[in-house]
Image (cartoon, rainbow, N blue to C red):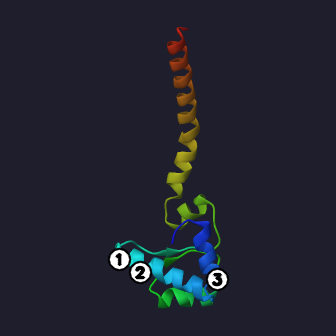
Amino acid sequence: MTKSRSTKSFVRNIGLSQSSAIIRAVIGLGRGLDLPIIAEGVESTDQLAFLTRESCDQVQGYLVGRPRPISDYAKYVGRAEDVEQLARVRPAISARQEQSHGADSRQNSGIG
């Protein structure tokens, strides 16, 4: 159950028997295929309790944490200097790509 608006609606409606049955089926399918199961859109302790009982591997949603900028995550895992370095290098890479693309266009058009 990853990255899909429709799976979020199943999690949102866990109290309804059809949604619960679909979630159980998806978890069973994932288990059968030896795939990790990640439920998205978890916003209540009841949803979390249901997913825990059904052996869901991981959850995402406002209950466990709001989205954060990538720079905050980098600080959390001790990689802030990597993000800062990438931010400094990225403009230079983009400028070189633009220059290279312009030269390629001129060569292909017979200009240059």
Question: Which residue lies under the disc numbered 1?
Answer: 32
Q: Earlier in the sequence, mark 3 or mark 2?
A: 3
Tell me the SS state at disc 1: helix
**Residue 22, image x, y percentages:** 53, 80
Tell me the SS state at disc 2: helix
Question: Which residue lies under the disc numbered 2?
Answer: 28
Circle number at residue 76: none
Q: Is residue 9 above or below residue 44?
A: above
Q: Residue at x 56, y 64 (%)?
A: 73
> Which image quarter: residue 62?
bottom right
* Amino acid tagged 1: Gly
Q: Earlier in the sequence, mark 3 or mark 1?
A: 3
Q: Is 18 or 26 nearer to us in this picture?
A: 18
* Amino acid tagged 2: Gly
Q: Is residue 1 above or below residue 78?
A: below
Quick check: marks 1 and 2 in contact, CB under 8 Å? yes
